[in-house]
Amino acid sequence: MSTFQAPKGTYDLLPPDSAKYLAVREAIAAPLKNSGYGYIETPGFENVELFSRGVGESTDIVSKEMYAFETKGGDQLALRPEGTASVLRAALEASLHKLGNLPVKLWYSGSYYRYEKPQKGRYRHFSQVGAEAIGAEDPALDAELIILADQAYRSLGLRTFRILLNSLGDKECRPVYRAALQDFLRGLELDEDTRRRIDINPLRILDDKRAEVQQQLAGAPMLRDYLCDACKAYHEEVGELLGAAGVAYEDDEKLVRGLDYYTRTTFEFVHDGLGSQSAVGGGGRYDGLSEMIGGPALPSVGWALGVDRTVLALEAEGITLELPAATSVFAVPLGEEARRLLFGVVTELRRAGVAADFAYGGKGLKGAMKNANRSGARFTIVAGERDLADGVVQLKDMESGEQTPVALDAVVDEIRAKLV
């Protein structure tokens, strides 16, 4: 009989590896919770138009990678390919911006979906933790988000990542640059698909990874030369705030990123140990996105960090996270009376906040002790008829192998004292 497998380009998270992913999510979220960001959860699918208008129809994400479908009721929906548009839609729908406390600071964690060619570090289903600060135009906010991501990565022990920083200008200066870039690109020998992009979104061509395209782009006009004074000053202040906080970054005037909604600050976290999929996260300012999806003008900034990519970065640096043992105490009953009493002890331990497990299935001593070993428990409680007749259980230290009798009514307090 054949068995089902996970769809191509996806993966299942299973213990013990899943504990690593949980620890990464928690490490990324911790600085956000400490900085005024509240948790938000949005549906796994949205109206197609939210992404085609927000992310941009010319982007690969929308034009080639989005999972779009029609429901039985005729609605045009898409699995979410990224988080920002959904979070902003939810914030607008709930009128969070009208509560008078701007910026609205939100963080989220979830799965996202893109139809891509599967390879290590690039999946069709992937996990991200993201943060958005909605409704304020302030270089300190851009710097705050970059600093918090840096803090999260460093708390995990990562050291060899780099932060790339650029400015994409605003609605005043970017159109002037766009026109100059289009004139330059029209003079190049480009394939039909790339030529189409000249009219729709020429900046994306700068991000083309093909060597033959990059060669032709050598003399392209640089956006940095077209920035207005306000955008230059804004970019410099973000850099100064990062420098003052001791966060190193590289000014990268070629950094574009693959989403249409970015304005001014854009940044990327890259790890050189990951080969071609070197970006572990990134983000930027998106001052016009709210208006694109039918909301009021709400200048905003945010980022998303890839959980899968961060785990790969940890592996590339040889970092093993110190994860708490899933089980601290394992109970092994020998006989029906011991089974009843030790199950009560396990329940009591759990209520006292001690991670405890039980030898289910009526296994003998040898099999049950094998389970205890595999569980990683620090202590094992063993009890048979003779022990119970004496009112004790045997408490075995799995590290030293030492075994001592402990009064049944004192075992919970004894274990808690030893685990401190």
Image (cartoon, rainbow, N blue to C red):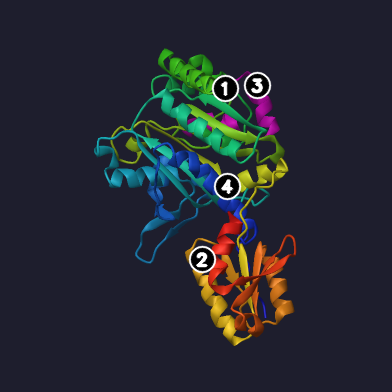
Give the foreground label among 1 and 3.
1
> Farthest residue in the front direction?
390
Q: What SS does tag 1 mark?
A: loop
Q: What SS does tag 3 mark?
A: helix
Packing grade of label 3 (10 A; few <14, some 14-19, many >=20) is few
Give the foreground label among 3 and 4.
4
Question: Which residue is disc 2 drawn over?
Answer: 350
Confirm whether the magenta stretch covers residue 217: yes
Question: Which residue is disc 3 drawn over?
Answer: 218
- Is the stretch drawn in magenta largely helix, strand or loop? helix
Please, what is the three-letter code of the amino acid marked with disc 2? Arg
Say if 232 sits above or below 111 in the image.
above
Q: Quadrant of residue 125?
A: bottom right
Give percent across and percent down for residue 85. Answer: 41, 43
How far, Cα to Cα, is label 2 from label 3?
Answer: 64 Å
Confirm whether the magenta stretch covers residue 264: no
Packing grade of label 2 (10 A; few <14, some 14-19, many >=20) is some
Q: What SS does tag 2 mark?
A: helix
Say if 176 sits above or below 63 in the image.
above
Question: Which residue is disc 1 drawn over?
Answer: 253
Question: Which residue is disc 4 drawn over?
Answer: 24
Please, what is the three-letter code of the amino acid marked with disc 3? Ala
Please, what is the three-letter code of the amino acid marked with disc 1? Glu
Say if 173 sits above or below 319 in the image.
above
Quick check: marks 1 and 4 in contact, CB under 8 Å?
no
